[in-house]
């Protein structure tokens, strides 16, 4: 046809499958579980127990295979050469047997065991990619004294310039994968107790986590939106999954409606950014803003504001926090544990990636807004938490306060600020999963015994649970020898380095107010009265394992924070392509 312009060829992006392996493990795991349960809805008990036991060895072998595909060397090749092949394979067989016996001892269901295995495979793939590409290469003492910096691997353009893998994305990916493992362990006991049959919750859990990993490494606003919707839609359904409770249905509906509004703001913000820069790719936006002087940046500033609204909803920042207390109170408690950990971590990863990488040259325009959001989030989270009577609502406002602390690190807009965000998100993930894990056990059938009165005398009904919840609350309060103390110290140090002195002061004041909230819960557990005929609380092995792992990480990295601190500092944020 005359006058028709030729259609430019569509370039197929280069794909690095090894870098995508953590996401693929979760997505493929969800598909396999759907396919399996569509064929075999319910198996005889003896076959179900045998198949569940096999998940342990299969998970070990899958981690081995994924490590071999992602890495450049056969996993544990040096160990095989040192001990010899016979001893090596005998040891491998013993590991497989022990893993099967461990799964049997947990009394876990097949769907939960499968999801835990998939989460571990995703985490193993993340660790191997980190070791192969992003672990800092050691330098000699002479090189260090000469000022030579450690050599870090560069970002991987995993899917063209649309999705990249750097140290920042991998650390958040590992945190999300571990959150999947712990949440699946909590789901096993909860779903049996509530009589919720089916694998739907586990499938949605893996799909949501896959969306979170996409958000953490997105180099394109459209890819970011796709990851956000994958994460969000699954969580909307999970929040409303307990159909026997009207509170669960109500929380899912509220979360969905307000989430749809936030997604609309996010899309309008993307449209504004495209109108101002002519691109939705973070690489293209960064190049454009560095090379072109924008005389009238009203459209760009409007795009910043709308993006902050959309992402601020996901991180529960004030004034976009109103949904949090109602949704946390009504949704199933293990779902809340996943929302407060993995969902929040993925949202902060996306927020930092977009504003720190693409819009860093305009930090003077967006820093004041985040400064104000941080102040409001800190104060609202702290002061409204202390007037609540329901433990889940208390922790909901506490979660808002912790979001304010992370925003303090985001506002710094420095490398130390980014490292503090990584550290805080990782530390808070395990503290909040453990806290809601204890509440999930204590709340009992119907998920209703979550008020402060229900925690009265918990020390007499279950001293171990009371002790664990006390340590988790002390960690969230920032008491020394916990990861919460180190996380708060890192964030405040980043704020002081950025000369945000008043923000650091407000953060410390909010920490003192929040400490009253946590102390109130602790006093209720140890000094509150309880009926003499109250039955002791039994803890299922899977829930005990999840709470125990979270507790070990909270206290262990509080006593020895060096490894996770080094990991946060090595989580270099970069654009691929």
Image (cartoon, rainbow, N blue to C red):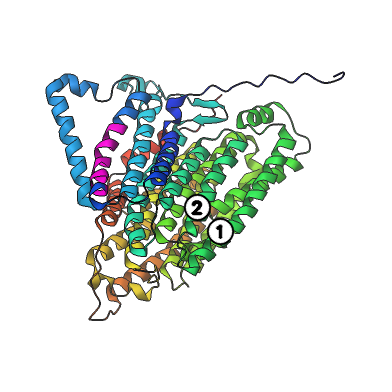
Specify the farthest residue to the right. 2
Above or below for 419 versus 262: above
In magenta segment, residue 55: yes
Q: In this view, does 82 lie above or below 216?
A: above
| In the image: residue 227, left or right of residue 77 | right
- Point out the image quarter for the N terminus: top right
User: Mark 1 or mark 2, which has the lower sequence index?
Assistant: 2
Above or below residue 132? Residue 483 is below
Q: Considering depth in this image, is 515 or 133 the residue closer to the camera?
A: 133
Number of residues whose C-alpha sits closer than 10 Å to that of mark 1, classed few (under 14), some (14–19) or many (20 or more): many
Where is mark 1, residue-wise? 255
Dot 2 alpha-carbon crowd within 10 angstroms: few under 14, some 14 to 19, many 20 or more? many
- Helix, strand or loop under label 1: helix
Tell me if residue 346 can be seen: yes
Which x, y percent locates residue 147?
40, 23
Is 213 one of the magenta-colored residues? no
Q: Magenta span: helix, strand or loop, mainly?
A: helix
Residue extent of the magenta highlight: 48-62
**Marks 2 and 1: in contact by CB < 8 Å?**
yes
**Residue that label 2 marks:** 235
Query: Of 544 and 345, which appears nearest the observer?
Result: 544
Q: As drawn, is 36 to the left or to the right of 346?
A: left
Pinpoint residue 361: horizontal percent, then vertical percent.
Answer: 63, 35
Residue 151 x %, y %: 41, 23
């Amino acid at each position: 046809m005359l006058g028709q312009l030729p259609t430019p060829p569509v370039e197929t992006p280069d794909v690095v499958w090894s870098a995508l392996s953590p996401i693929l493990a979760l997505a493929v795991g969800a598909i396999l579980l759907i396919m399996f349960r569509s064929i075999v809805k319910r198996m005889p008990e003896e076959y179900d127990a045998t198949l569940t036991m096999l998940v342990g060895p299969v998970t070990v072998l899958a981690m081995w295979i994924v490590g071999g595909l992602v890495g450049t060397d056969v996993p544990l090749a040096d160990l095989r050469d040192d001990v010899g092949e016979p001893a090596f394979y005998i040891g491998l067989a013993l590991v497989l047997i022990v893993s099967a016996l461990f799964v049997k001892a947990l009394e876990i269901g097949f769907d939960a065991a499968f999801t835990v295995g998939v989460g571990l495979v995703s985490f193993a793939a993340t660790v191997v990619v980190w070791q192969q590409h992003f672990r800092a290469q050691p330098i000699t003492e002479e090189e260090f004294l000469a000022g030579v910096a450690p050599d870090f691997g560069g970002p991987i353009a995993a899917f063209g310039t649309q999705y990249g893998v750097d140290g920042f994305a991998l650390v958040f990916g590992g945190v999300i994968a571990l959150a999947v493992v712990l949440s699946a362990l909590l789901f096993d006991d909860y779903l049996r107790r509530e009589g919720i049959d089916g694998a739907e919750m586990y499938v949605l859990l893996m799909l949501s986590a896959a969306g979170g990993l996409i958000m953490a490494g997105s180099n394109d606003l459209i890819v970011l939106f796709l990851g956000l919707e994958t994460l969000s839609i699954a969580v909307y359904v999970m929040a409303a999954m307990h159909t026997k409770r009207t509170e669960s249905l109500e929380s899912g509906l509220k979360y969905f409606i307000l989430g749809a509004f936030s997604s609309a703001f996010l899309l309008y913000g993307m449209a504004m950014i495209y109108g101002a820069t002519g691109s939705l790719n973070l690489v293209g936006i960064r190049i454009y803003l560095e090379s072109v002087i924008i005389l009238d940046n009203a459209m760009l500033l409007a795009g910043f504001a709308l993006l902050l609204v959309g992402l601020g909803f996901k991180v529960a920042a004030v004034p976009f926090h109103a949904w949090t207390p109602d949704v946390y109170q009504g949704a199933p408690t293990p779902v809340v544990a996943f929302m407060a950990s993995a969902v929040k971590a993925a949202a902060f990863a996306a927020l930092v990636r977009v504003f720190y990488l693409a819009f860093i040259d305009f930090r003077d325009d967006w820093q004041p807004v985040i400064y104000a959001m941080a102040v409001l989030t800190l104060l609202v989270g702290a002061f409204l938490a202390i007037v609540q009577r329901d433990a889940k609502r208390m922790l909901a406002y506490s979660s808002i306060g912790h979001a304010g602390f992370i925003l303090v690190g985001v506002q710094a807009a420095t490398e130390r600020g980014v490292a503090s965000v990584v550290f805080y998100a990782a530390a808070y993930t395990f503290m909040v999963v453990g806290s809601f894990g204890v509440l999930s056990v204590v709340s009992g059938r119907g998920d209703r015994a979550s008020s402060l009165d229900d925690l009265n005398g918990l020390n007499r009904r279950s001293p171990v649970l009371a002790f664990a919840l006390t340590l988790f609350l002390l960690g969230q309060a920032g008491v020394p020898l916990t990861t919460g103390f180190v996380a708060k110290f890192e964030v405040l140090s980043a704020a002081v380095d950025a000369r945000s002195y008043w923000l650091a002061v407000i953060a410390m004041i909010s920490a003192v107010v929040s400490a009253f909230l946590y102390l109130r819960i602790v006093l209720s557990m140890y000094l509150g009265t309880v009926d003499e005929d109250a039955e002791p609380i039994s803890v299922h092995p899977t829930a005990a394992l999840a709470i125990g792992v979270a507790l070990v990480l909270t206290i262990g990295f509080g006593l020895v924070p060096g490894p996770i601190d080094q990991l946060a500092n090595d989580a270099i944020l970069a654009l691929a392509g």
